[in-house]
Amino acid sequence: MSATVLFVDDDKAFLDSLQDGLDARRCGYTVLVATDVPNAINLLTTEAVDLVVTDLKMPGQGGFDLLAHMVEHHPMTPSIVMTAYGTPDMERRAEQLGALRLLAKPLDLRELQRQLDRVLGSRSGSLQGVSVAGFLQLLSMERSTCLVTIVGDGGKAGLSFVDGRLVDAQHGGLRGDAAVLKIAALKSPRIAVGQLTRTPEQTVATDLPTLLMEAALHQDEADREAGVTDEQINEALAKLLKMEGCLGVAVLRPPGQLIALHSPSGVDMERMGKVAGEALTKAQETAAEMHAGDCQLLYLEGSEASVFCRGVGGRESGGSGSAGPSTALQVVLALDPGANPGMGRIVLNAAADALSDLIR
């Protein structure tokens, strides 16, 4: 079956010459054209489009509006963007962040066909479309000055770009680098690009490519965790539960997603686990700000219970410019006040090592 390619550009003469050139080269693709974004969206809705090739700068709604629509509604449809800033290095970086390919303008027909053959020749169900990370990377490459609003899981987010540099990012209670990492992981959100009406406060300390690569690593870790069974997790926790004085155990994925819970004493481990996990995350951020190194263990001694919270997996903070230590999982152990905390720490570390091996 012939693949269908949708070309989007406001220059009708350019689209006609492009269609004639591809026909003359007998590429074998079905070619659809749209001179504006509304028509392109209509064709994406009514036709089985395998690939979109779009310009960015068009009157009215532009290429970024089309790509934003695709992030939300067509996340598996790959794209090629025609840009004056397309270089081999930029193309490589864009592909790493969401299967977004770049073509330098003015367009070379042979290079276009090579890219079409490359993308459409690899259709195997593994292709992905424009990701949030790829979208943000493209804004940076195009040296955009704009306000990006993103609505997805966890509420509304905002990012401010000035001449392609990401200056400010906010998502829920997060700001700066931590907010970017959260935003980049959103799946099929609603995106809008608008004018920047005020000078934003500088909250993002790390350059965007570094943050996006870190977000991709976080996602890889989450994908590995998804393959771990409940039985494997419970086996890793077995020695904790057998320890004398154990009140309960919880395992969470930051920020606060509970994935395992055992409370033989009836203690509210769901609440205790989430609060302890938040405390460890805050301690990690504080340690990073103080240049104190990685912080993966928190111990609280109370009159009713002693609580350990241990981070599992992830990497150390890169210093003052990073978003703090990355932790894949958090293990919370609650002990009776009379239990041996030293033994609790030893057994907890053994359980954490077992979990780390599972998600490695």
Image (cartoon, rainbow, N blue to C red):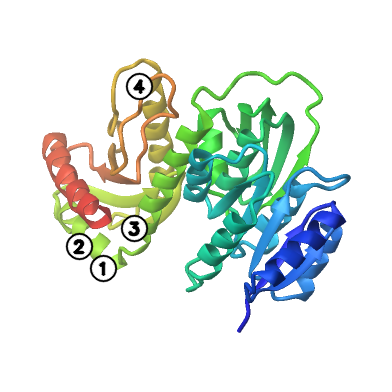
The picture quadrant where one finds residue 106 is top right
Q: Secondary structure at mark 3?
A: helix
The picture quadrant where one finds residue 203 is top right
Which of labels 2 and 4 is toward the front?
Answer: 4
**Alpha carbon distance from label 2 to label 4:** 32 Å
Report whether 136 appears left or right of 124.
right
The answer to which of marks 4 and 1 sits earlier in the sequence is 1
Relative to the observer, which residue lies in front, 109 or 301? 109
**Alpha carbon distance from label 3 to label 4:** 27 Å
Residue 231 — which label?
1
Residue 117 in the image, given as x and y percentages of width and height: 54, 66
Q: Residues within 10 Å of mark 1 (few under 14, many from 20)?
A: few
Q: Is residue 232 above or below residue 175?
A: below
Taking the spot 28% from the left edge, 58% from the top edge, the residue there is: 264
Residue 287 — which label?
4
Q: Count the marks.
A: 4
* Residue under label 2: 235
Residue 301 in the image, given as x and y percentages of width and height: 27, 30
Amino acid marked by disc 3: Arg
